[in-house]
Amino acid sequence: DVKVTQSSRYLVKRTGEKVFLECVQDMDHENMFWYRQDPGLGLRLIYFSYDVKMKEKGDIPEGYSVSREKKERFSLILESASTNQTSMYLCASSSPGINTGELFFGEGSRLTVL
Amino acid sequence: KNQVEQSPQSLIILEGKNCTLQCNYTVSPFSNLRWYKQDTGRGPVSLTIMTFSENTKSNGRYTATLDADTKQSSLHITASQLSDSASYICVVYQAGTALIFGKGTTLSVSS
């Protein structure tokens, strides 16, 4: 069964802390994505990656960075968390034919920044 | 502007009843459209994909339609069950460019 695993389901952090959200997929997919989901706004793309060591900005990259050192792992980093980054974060992967292929999502990481 | 609009924003129906969710898009050039189901606190899961040449596709009690001329899609749920309570997200692929997400419809099925 295909699987995208996000390291933490729930996190509570303080303003200014550095936050790491990790995502691992076992489907050998080239493409990986990070979205945030907020009520009334839907899913918004933060960053994506087509290959190891490669990253592209999405629609809302400000305040975030990413790392992809291995094909199966894609990490989202909040260098200095702020309260407006309180959200549900969803990682996804897909096979090439990036936007024609199905997105496989993780269970999500709900981050609260106090 | 490339947009995907879903309606209604939320919907409450009784168990056993049918319902239809709407997705209108202005995305061009169009490649395909997917419907995802997202249970509360979980990640979205694909229900079905509609390509330009397809009008209707069924997946169990879920039936999706696509009218490429009017740029409209619908998701019809037959004989609803409590487990159908979820958010349903319409996603359109703008050929060669990007995935455009709708904001979703939240469906609540009550007994």
Image (tube, helix red, strand yellow):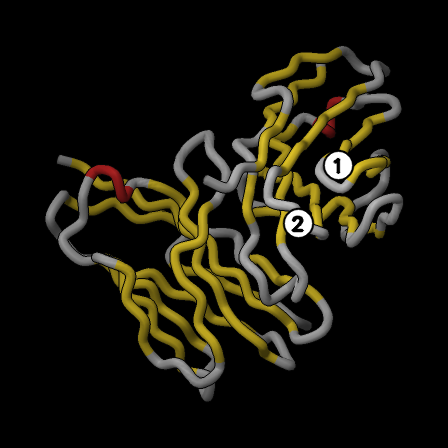
> Which of the marked residues, 2 or 1, is nearer the chain's N terminus?
2
Specify the subunit that label 2 lies on: A
Amino acid carrying label 1: it is: Phe
Q: Quadrant of residue B19?
A: bottom left
Q: Nearer the viewer, mark 2 or mark 1?
A: 2
Question: What's the residue type where badge 2 is placed?
Answer: His
Numbered tag placed on residue A29 in the rendering: 2
Chain letter for the residue marked with disc 1 in the picture: A
Is B14 above or below relative to A114? below
Residue B72 image point, x, y percent: 43, 76
**Is residue A66 at least partly visible in the picture?**
no
- Residue A77 in the image, given as x and y percentages of width and height: 81, 28
The residue at the point 82 percent across, 27 percent down is A78
Q: Which residue in the protein does label 1 denote? A: A74
Residue under the point 43% across and 42% down: B38
State the CA–CA distance, disc 2 to disc 1: 11 Å
Q: Residues within 10 Å of mark 2 (few under 14, many from 20)?
A: some
Question: In the displayed structure, would residue A114 be above or below residue A48?
Answer: above
Q: Residue at x 23, y 58 (%)?
A: B60
Question: Quick check: B94 left or right of B38?
Answer: right
The secondary element bearing badge 1 is classed as strand
Using the image, determine if residue B15 lies above or below residue B40: below
| Secondary element type, mark 2 | loop
